[in-house]
Image (cartoon, rainbow, N blue to C red):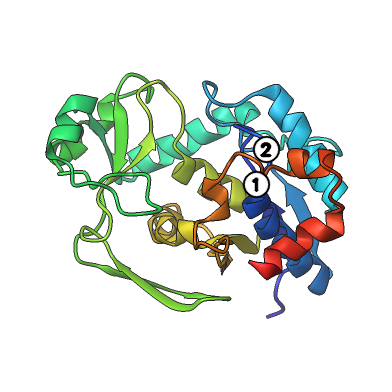
Amino acid sequence: MQNPPYRGRIAPSPTGLMHVGHACTFWTAYQRALEHRGTLVFRDEDLDPQRSKADYATAMLEDLQWLGIRWQEGPDVGGPFGPYEQSRRREFYRETWRKLRDGGFIYPCTCSRKDLTMSAAAPNEGDDEPMYPGRCRERIGDAKQYESPAGVNWRFRVPDDEVIRFEDLHLGAQSYVAGRDFGDFVVWRRDDVSSYQLAVVADDAAMQITEVVRGADLLKSTARQLLLVRALGLPVPGYYHCDLVRDEAGVRLAKRHDALSLRTLRETGKTAEEVLRMCQVY
Ligand SMILES: [Zn+2]
């Protein structure tokens, strides 16, 4: 059987100015799509209404274009798999939530933020989600009583002790143990917003993405997402995780928001070529 045509994506969040650390990853995604003579999709991950700003969404399109990245589908150019803004795909995520509910994969979690901070272990570096202690796990049978996800957090029940393996196209063999490296993760938030994990898996499948290129800080999220992919019966994309760009002191560039936005570099007279050299030099 022939492989489907290459479809890659760049998926920034408009929660600030585009940062050189992220831009380097998007540049790699662009190069991978070019090498495969594939299609590159631009997806605006403006999922979080509190943190996403329309001005930043415009700026990231402009800044990546200035850098020289070109895409064939996106919020500015349209395409057959739109809309390309996550804020306009809510009904679609809700449908994915229903499938997970009906399949018995998720449960409502009523733990307060305070409950969780008191019992949870501190998250590891690069991992935004603390380990959930599992207090509401037994409520998995209650899930079908919910017509709508709003009002509680929804968690995916991970298969304890299962080893999740995948071959990263850049970093090689990876493995994580469910229930030990990560716990039952949130797929829907009580403020009625889909989690990053659910939205990304649903969108990558709907947009027929064949290869996911992103930063190595998301390796563990890939293990979580593979569980969602399996639960939903979706095709598994290839994964290519980029090394995180660090400065001379070893600090991740993405952590230094001050002077390293593309906007600032551009305004201080740097050329796109000079910015791209930062991706290799550091
Ligand atoms: Zn709970």
> Can you see residue 145?
yes
Q: Which residue position holds label 1?
A: 11
Classify mark 1: helix, strand or loop.
loop
Give whichever of 245, 60 is nearer the camera: 245
Query: Which amino acid type corresponds to the residue marked 2 in the rendered image?
Result: Asp
Q: Where is residue 11 drawn, in percent x and y?
A: 65, 46
The response on whether ligand 1 sits within 8 Å of label 2 is no
Q: Is residue 235 left or right of residue 56?
A: left
Give whichever of 138, 35 is nearer the camera: 35
Ligand 1 shows up in which quadrant of the image?
A: top left
Q: Which mark is residue 172?
A: none
Q: Where is residue 159 drawn, in percent x and y?
A: 24, 59
Q: Which residue position holds label 2?
A: 44
* Residue 275, picture quadrant: bottom right
Asked whether disc 2 touches disc 1, contact meaning CB atoms under 8 Å apart, the reply is: yes
Q: Is residue 48 left or right of residue 147?
A: right
Classify mark 2: helix, strand or loop.
loop
